[in-house]
Image (cartoon, rainbow, N blue to C red):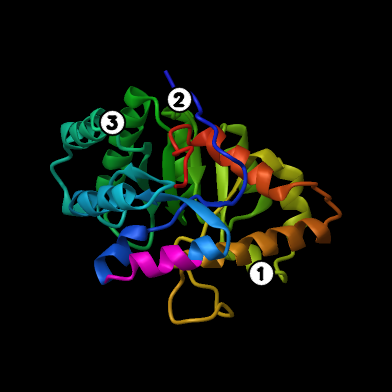
Amino acid sequence: MCSSARHGSTEGWIDSHCHLDAFLTDGSLDEVIRAARLAGVVRWIVPGVEPKTWAGVMEVCRRVAGAGFALGVHPWYAHCYPDVDASRLKNAIGQALDGGLPVVAVGEAGLDRLRGAMAAQIEWLRVQVECANEFGLPLILHCVRRHGQLLEFLTRYRPACGFVVHGFSGAPELAGQYIRLGGYLGLGRALCRPDWPHWPAFFEQVPLERILVETDAPDMKASDWPGERNVPSNLVRVVQALRERLDDVGIRYPDVQAMLSENTFRLFAGLPASTV
């Protein structure tokens, strides 16, 4: 059974995909969280990408109010764990839940044509769908140039509690296929491409209720964003770009912040309600 939503306030922005553990590692976590809060970002979802990062991900969520996390094996690192062991992931999730930690999803799972071994990616993806279904959690997905294969996989092994394809930048028709399978789309840097000609068709395929926003910090920095790296406070730039894209196609939505918060809580029911 899928987790029941514990809705918090819709005030403040939620970064649905942010690797805060990278900032813990380099010692800048407190600084970037202060800056994010000043910008109005109050919640974060922190995906784990391989077992050796899981402890750092959990430590972030102990220290940062409003942060929830996922545990999984990213396709880039799947080949590093050739002895696919579902019990390792299940035990880690179970222990975290028993300890009262805010586990909100499984992942970051997926397929990537450009990096990693495909056989290992597929096997770890299967295991992560199994874990998500067993614990009643949604799945966070990464996909690069393997969308056809991922769609085929999701049709056969559908996550029972939903999924999000994070960092989505594909064609409207592709977006519609994920939506029809019950998915959400995480939009980040791609929203900052006003020259992309497909926004009208994109919003015809994708209901606003299936959109999440993200930074993917410290990765995926847009070229015109300040600084040398992507940071969580850049979420306000993503949100402003979303508003501009909606304006461009004549969509007027009275409260974008509330809509995005409701979308995120709907999918990630275990996200902490409190941000203090």
Numbered tag placed on residue 160 in the rendering: 2
Kind of residue at badge 3: Leu
**Residue 172's spot in the image, x, y percent?**
67, 50
Q: Residue at x 66, y 69 (%)?
A: 193
Q: CA distance from mark 3 to mark 2?
A: 19 Å
Kind of residue at badge 1: Arg
**Residue 267's spot in the image, x, y percent?**
52, 35
**Depth check, front residue: 265 or 121:** 265
* Magenta-colored span: 27-35
Question: In screen coordinates, is 127 left or right of 39?
Answer: left
Q: Nearer the viewer, mark 1 or mark 3?
A: 3
Mark 2 surroundings: few (<14), some (14-19) or many (≥20) residues within 10 A: some
Indicate the secondary structure of the residue bearing disc 3: helix
Question: In screen coordinates, is 14 left or right of 47?
Answer: right
Q: Residue at x 54, y 57 (%)?
A: 41
Q: Main secondary structure of the magenta part?
A: helix
Numbered tag placed on residue 193 in the rendering: 1
Q: CA distance from mark 1 to mark 3?
A: 39 Å
Kind of residue at badge 2: Ala
| Lower sequence index among marks 1 and 2 | 2
| Lower sequence index among marks 3 and 2 | 3
